[in-house]
Image (spheres, helix red, strand yellow):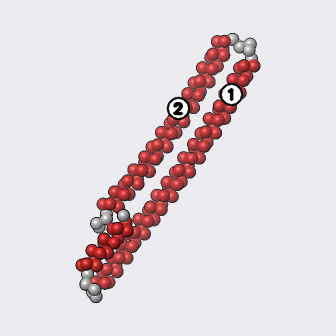
Amino acid sequence: SVKGVAKHLEVTIASKCSFGKGQGILDAQHAEVAACLRGLEQQKRDWEHEEQNMEATLQRKEQEARERVQALEDRLVQRDFEVQRRMALSVKEVEALVAKEREKAVQRQQELDEREALLDKRDKEVNRLLREVQAYEKQHQGD
């Protein structure tokens, strides 16, 4: 962790410095480590904020998609009711209408599946970025 890196650097530097002359060097290095820690903490907060924004956006888009599907389903129900009212239509005409509505339903489902795939892709990207940060932190622990 970042705090572990800072502690390790502090102990290493302290062991190499004598207590009079080296204290200024130790203080400067300690300040440098503290600045790096602040930078990493800021970067972490930025990423968390970005992740929250992405989550909110994804939830909003998912809700919008659900609302569109509900509206389409409502229209489909209304159309079905109209079909039932108009018994004058031949069976073939009704079958063609139902097939058309099924195609539309399949298309809507495909759109939902595509959106879900995009959400999964974004989640994977966020996880990849987090792994990169962790790897970076791990790699620079001894610096």
Q: Residue visible at 44% across and 62% down?
A: 43
Residue 139, above or below 73: below
Residue 2, above or below 132: below
- Find residue 48 and report its horizontal and vertical position in percent: 48, 58
- Find residue 67 and report its horizontal and vertical position in percent: 64, 39
Residue 92, above or below 42: above
Q: Which residue is mark 1?
A: 77
Check residue 141 in the rendering and tell me which mark sits there, or answer none: none
Name the image quarter holding the N terminus. Answer: bottom left
Q: Give the total of numbered labels.
A: 2
Q: Residue visible at 29% across and 75% down?
A: 11
23 sits to left or right of 47: left
Q: Which residue is mark 2?
A: 110
Location of residue 16 by image quarter? bottom left
- Find residue 24 and report its horizontal and vertical position in percent: 32, 83
Which amino acid type is marked by label 2?
Gln
Q: Residues within 10 Å of mark 1 (few under 14, many from 20)?
A: few
46 sits to left or right of 28: right
Disc 2 element:
helix
Residue 131, above or below 61: below
Q: Residues within 10 Å of mark 2 (few under 14, many from 20)?
A: few
Disc 1 element:
helix
Residue sticking out furthest to the bottom: 20
Q: Residue visible at 36% across and 74% down?
A: 32
